[in-house]
């Protein structure tokens, strides 16, 4: 939408999901003004036919298209929580929004024009009391919805003539988000100004206490001495240096003998409680069963290049045992595999260079499949980490893997002191060109994985910390091959060599995904004495950008790092609330399983392309969780985390 100052058509969605079109003319008495957040222009429009004023906060097309997302999501949380005729008058009211367009915007009902700071000198004790209680009531509603306003001051709180209300949510955050430095003293606490810890609704309690002092005409140094008995106790704890030491808005209302808002329980609470019961039962569960003796031995970080004797592991294609030896070596050429003679390699550094590009032919003793070759780096390094991506066709497995690799290349594992290199340079470059670059450089939608009879690895990396190295291999198989009605094929044999699984849950599909339970059934031999499967796993709700305005996805999709059980609890509750029983099967049947929200693209495609480009959001978090469960994740470096 280009802002010309002339009539505009406002096409938007209401909080209830209805599509609405208004024709509006600009209110020339209220000139457009930039917001505190760069790239946002705020202006007032008058709806044709009623002259109803609405505030539009519109994003400049050059800004991040998701800059308004938290504001929209916070407005939707409030609108969905309260009925139309029972919406609290102390809260700002969102009228609608448009998100997936070139210039996203949100529409708000205009608040009263009078800033409470403008009338502070004229307010008597009763009016100040009412303003404070109205503000605390609004903060109690926000806290119940998990929203932290962050911008409470004498301009953001408006005077209605009888009481007070909050105007807008332009800088809101969700409770539990990592704090980012924002605000200025005295309105914001030192924690908030410096960006320490996690956002807490009691951040706003600090600001409310400061506002009370402004209304009473006090300066910060004389608060406690001049407040009198009614407010002295109130502000004593409300200005505590840490949010955890302050009372909540609801507790302050009780102190003031003011009615506390009655808030209904969240529809997510049932799922959250069930997840906590599962966690509690696992805490006392039996230890994982020992791996069957015929399986390969697992070596950990102590085994790396230079270890005494080669390690034996199963070939991920035929499952026959294979060890490293400098025999039967080949290199890949345009004409296929060509034998490599290390006798002519020359000095050691040239020999190592040749080995870096070499493959060893699998002994293939059973002969169930034709000749096949394993990268030398896969055999020469420590014990491999074979990770399978599980999910039905079009669930988003290929896009998720591209997102994982893109985040790895951006250095996400460097926070843990892990360096990466390709298992096979040419193979990795092909994956980069055909997957990562097409998606993130060219903005193209990737095609689905085609069903084939034999599945090789999709990509592989060497994880290194100093002299210790382990190969990490990803296997992406067409969803059709994993269906329960499909006969066992060579394409699914890699499951027997899998060390970890990524279950990719499509949140928008209408029919249940039966691949999850089918794969778990095929791995029944790895059950422990309590019947739980012993294979570290994650469930990833991919395409979460399509759900970014739904609670609790709205918070997690923008979180910078995983938050242990809290995210798993919320993902479980989200799927549980929607009756996605099949997608919760890994949690119920696998001993160690975490859950995550992620998006490989960050937005919706149009005609096979992403108009604003694609970007991964939290794709690496499931991998980090898996590496932690596998004992392959060193502690973060000092200062990281």
Image: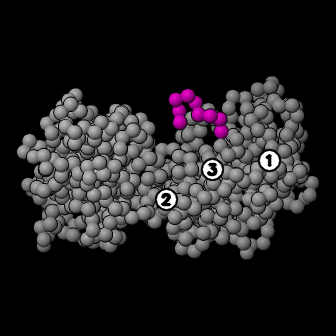
Looking at the image, which is closer to me, 362 or 516?
516
Left or right: 440, with 515 as reference point: left
Q: Is residue 404 above or below residue 90?
A: above
Name the residue beneath numbered marker 2. Answer: 544
- Packing grade of label 3 (10 A; few <14, some 14-19, many >=20) is some
For this rendering, which residue is in front, 120 or 79? Answer: 120
- Side (left or right) of 441 relative to 457: left
Q: Quadrant of the N terminus?
A: bottom left
- Mark toward the start of the polypeptide (1 vs 2): 1
Left or right: 51 in relation to 40: left
Residue on which the image places disc 1: 374
> Could you give the CA–CA distance between mark 1 and mark 3, rounded to whole angstroms?
17 Å
* In magenta segment, residue 640: yes
How dense is the environment of label 2, judged by Cα within 10 Å: few (below 14), some, or many (20 and up)?
many
Q: CA distance from mark 1 to mark 2?
A: 36 Å
Whole-percent x, y for residue 542 in the image: 54, 59
Residue holding disc 3: 431
Magenta range: 633-641
Helix, strand or loop at label 2? It is helix
Instruction: Tell me if label 1 and label 3 are in contact, CB under 8 Å.
Output: no
Name the element at disc 1. Answer: strand
Q: Is residue 613 visible?
A: no
Q: CA distance from mark 2 to mark 3?
A: 24 Å
Give the number of the disc on residue 66.
Answer: none
Q: Indicate the position of residue 476 as horizontal and vertical percent values.
A: 67, 57
Residue 155 visible in the displayed image: yes
């Amino acid at each position: 939408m280009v802002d010309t100052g002339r009539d505009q058509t406002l096409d938007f969605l209401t909080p209830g999901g209805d599509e609405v079109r208004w024709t509006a003319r600009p209110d020339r008495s209220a000139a457009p003004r930039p917001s505190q957040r760069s790239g946002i222009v705020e202006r007032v429009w008058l709806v044709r036919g009623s002259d109803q004023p609405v505030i539009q906060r519109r994003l400049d097309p050059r800004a991040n298209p998701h800059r308004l997302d938290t504001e929209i999501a916070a407005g939707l949380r409030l609108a969905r929580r309260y009925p139309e005729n029972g919406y609290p008058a102390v809260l700002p009211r969102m009228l609608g929004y448009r998100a997936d367009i070139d210039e996203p915007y949100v529409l708000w009902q205009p608040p009263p024009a009078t800033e409470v700071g403008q009338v502070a000198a004229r307010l008597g004790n009763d009016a100040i009391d009412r303003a404070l209680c109205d503000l605390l009531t609004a903060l109690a509603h926000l806290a119940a919805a998990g929203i932290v306003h962050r911008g409470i001051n004498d301009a953001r709180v408006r005077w209605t003539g009888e009481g007070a209300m909050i105007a807008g949510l332009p800088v809101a955050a969700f409770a539990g988000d990592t704090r980012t430095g924002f605000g200025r003293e005295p309105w914001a606490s030192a924690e908030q100004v410096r960006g320490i810890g996690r956002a807490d609704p009691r951040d706003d309690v600090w600001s409310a206490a400061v506002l009370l002092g402004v209304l009473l005409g006090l300066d910060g140094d004389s608060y406690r001495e001049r407040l009198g008995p009614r407010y002295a106790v109130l502000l004593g704890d409300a200005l505590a240096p840490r949010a955890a030491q302050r009372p909540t808005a609801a507790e302050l209302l009780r102190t003031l003998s003011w009615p506390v808002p009655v808030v209904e329980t969240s529809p997510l609470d049932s799922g959250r409680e069930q997840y906590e019961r599962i966690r509690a039962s696992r805490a006392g569960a039996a230890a994982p069963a020992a791996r069957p003796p015929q399986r390969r031995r697992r070596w950990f970080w102590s085994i790396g290049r230079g270890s005494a004797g080669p390690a034996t592991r199963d070939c991920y294609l035929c499952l026959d045992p294979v060890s490293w030896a400098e025999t039967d070596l080949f290199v890949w050429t345009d004409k296929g595999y060509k034998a490599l003679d290390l006798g002519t390699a020359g000095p050691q550094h040239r020999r190592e260079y040749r080995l870096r590009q070499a493959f060893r032919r699998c002994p293939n003793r059973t002969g169930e499949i034709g000749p096949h070759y394993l990268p030398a780096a896969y055999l020469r390094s420590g014990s491999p980490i074979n990770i399978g991506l599980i999910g039905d066709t079009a669930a988003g497995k290929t896009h998720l893997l591209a997102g994982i690799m893109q985040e790895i290349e951006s250095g996400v594992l460097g926070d843990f002191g892990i360096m990466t290199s390709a298992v096979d340079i040419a193979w990795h470059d092909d994956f980069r060109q055909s997957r990562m670059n097409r998606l993130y450089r060219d903005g193209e939608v990737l095609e689905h994985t085609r069903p084939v009879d034999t599945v090789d690895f999709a990509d592989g990396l060497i994880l290194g910390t100093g002299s210790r190295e382990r190969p990490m291999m990803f296997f992406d198989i067409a969803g059709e091959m994993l269906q329960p009605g499909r006969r066992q094929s060579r394409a699914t044999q890699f499951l027997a060599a899998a060390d970890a699984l990524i279950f990719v849950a499509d949140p928008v599909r209408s029919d249940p995904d039966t691949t999850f339970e089918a794969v778990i059934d095929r791995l029944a031999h790895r059950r422990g004495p309590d019947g739980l499967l012993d294979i570290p796993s994650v469930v990833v709700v991919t395409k979460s950008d399509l759900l970014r305005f739904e609670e609790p996805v709205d918070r997690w999709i923008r979180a910078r790092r995983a938050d242990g059980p809290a995210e798993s609890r919320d993902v479980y509750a989200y799927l549980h609330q929607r009756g996605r029983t099949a997608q919760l099967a890994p949690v119920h049947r696998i001993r160690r399983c975490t859950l995550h929200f992620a998006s490989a693209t960050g937005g919706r495609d149009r005609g096979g392309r992403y108009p604003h480009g694609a970007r991964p959001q939290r794709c690496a978090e499931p991998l980090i969780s898996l590496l932690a469960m596998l004992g392959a994740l060193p502690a973060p470096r000092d200062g990281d985390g």
